[in-house]
Image (tube, rainbow, N blue to C red):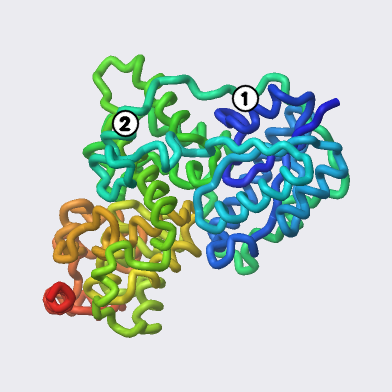
Amino acid sequence: MSTAIVWFRRDLRLADHAALTAAVKDYDRIVPLYIDAPEEEGEWSPGAAARWWLHHSLGALDGALGRFHGRLHIGRGASLEVLRDVVAATGASAVYWSRLYEPEALRRDAAIERALTADGVDVAVHRGSLWREPWEVMTRQDQPYKVFTPFWRSLRAQLDDAAPLPVPPSLRCAMVADGLSVDELSLLPGVDWTGGFSEWTPGEAGAADMLEVFGDDAVSAYTEARDLPARHGTSRLSPHLHWGEITPRQVAAGLRAQVAGSRRHVDIEPYLRQLGWREFGHHLLYHFPKTPTENFNPRFDGFHWKDCDAAILRRWQQGRTGIPIVDAGMRELWATGWMHNRVRMLVASLLTKNLRQHWSHGARWFWDTLVDADLANNSLGWQWVAGSGADEAPYFRIFNPVTQSEKFDPDGAYIRRWVPELADVPASRIHAPWEDPAILRRTGYPVPLVDLKSSREDALAAYRRTRA
């Protein structure tokens, strides 16, 4: 019987999986394989929260394969060596995988493809979890886009309503001896702070359930509700998308199907546009691979950041800045591995502009604590807020966390949930409790790390010096 290996990475699903579908069509049986090789990802191996998600997602994929009387074979070590070992053990004559776009992954995969081809093994690489490959969406001058709106126009014109690929109905798995169990990978953190992660259900089925919940109600109110952190007004699909448990095509098709029977008009375009930002992040990372560590805009190489202050960073990380909306976001992040997107912008603005700490310090913390930590979008988001990135928020646009809090959390519900010491503070005071010192004395809530007005002026002055 002919055998092919399907190498799973961040495509932990069976449906809408081009590499898997092609392998099942071309070969009699497949070997589903996952390789634990964090050293090959260098400094960007998954953070602690992401490893928690990966543990459960791999278990879910293994369970899904069990319905086909198969299992996920798990190897550990250098990817090329593991692939060669599995080829030798199974007689596989081909390896299929979905493309990744991080710089290290691209270099590694190219070397592996060359080596396997030299061994006489066929290699088939397919699109992974993007609508379009980064090189398929280019300007008329065949240059990469640097501004989102024209990028989205070009990408949107290329999208169609093609149905996602189904789970292959005749999936036959070959068994391999001596594989590791998911538990043996030791992905779960040694110190368990993940009690609040229980609201997540990693895996393909969990992604489908989350999409159904969003499509049933929230998508119809998305434009109005997406900026309100106290509500589940966003899809919360980001970790499922990052780990490839669902694809943008599946999301779009699912939403279209769910709203088709609605008695009222539901416009899903605003949400699809947000998925476009995800594609834009991967577009930038592919064409400008240094953006995770270097300013996209070289003008910022001369910006006067303050020296890294460990005490300030610690208070920011712990949600003890004395700015309630910021502290609520940082505590939500620690408790759940996720933070509302509006609040992500606020906590990033405070760190990079009011506190003038380099954006990389925040990006690193997010990398370790987000279940949806994605190199492309984490880098895009932090550089966008800091003012150093592509299509950046102008540096002089410094979010005022008090006015933002009053606008998007007017009754303080989000703050009360995550900053319980302020639960009894009236809405008129909860956004800026330092204005009434008696509140700070009674609650023990800290004085703000920084004066918002003067720190804004200092940041603008530093920006003007850079421009000069």
Is 197 rendered above or below residue 140?
below
* SS at circle 1: loop
**Dot 2 crowding, Cα within 10 Å, few <14, some 14–19, many 20+:** some
Give the image location of residue 182, x and y in percent. 72, 51
- Left or right of 48: which side holds 75? right
In the picture, the quarter occupied by the N terminus is top right
* The image quarter in which residue 26 lies: top right
Q: Which residue occupies the foreground of this view, 379 or 2?
A: 2
The disc labelled 1 sits on which kind of residue? Val
Q: Which residue is mark 2?
A: 156
Tell me what residue is drawn at x 72 percent, y 50 percent.
Answer: 115
Tell me what residue is drawn at x 72 percent, y 36 percent.
Answer: 122
Is 302 rendered above or below residue 116?
below
Residue 145 visible in the displayed image? yes
Labels 1 and 2: the sequence-earlier one: 2
Give the image location of residue 428, x and y in percent. 14, 61
Tell me what residue is drawn at x 51 percent, y 32 percent.
Answer: 208
**Dot 1 crowding, Cα within 10 Å, few <14, some 14–19, many 20+:** some
Give the image location of residue 102, x and y in percent. 50, 54
In the picture, the quarter occupied by the C terminus is bottom left
Numbered badge on residue 167: 1
Q: How far apart are the two marked residues, 1 and 2, measured between alpha carbons?
A: 26 Å
The disc labelled 2 sits on which kind of residue? Arg
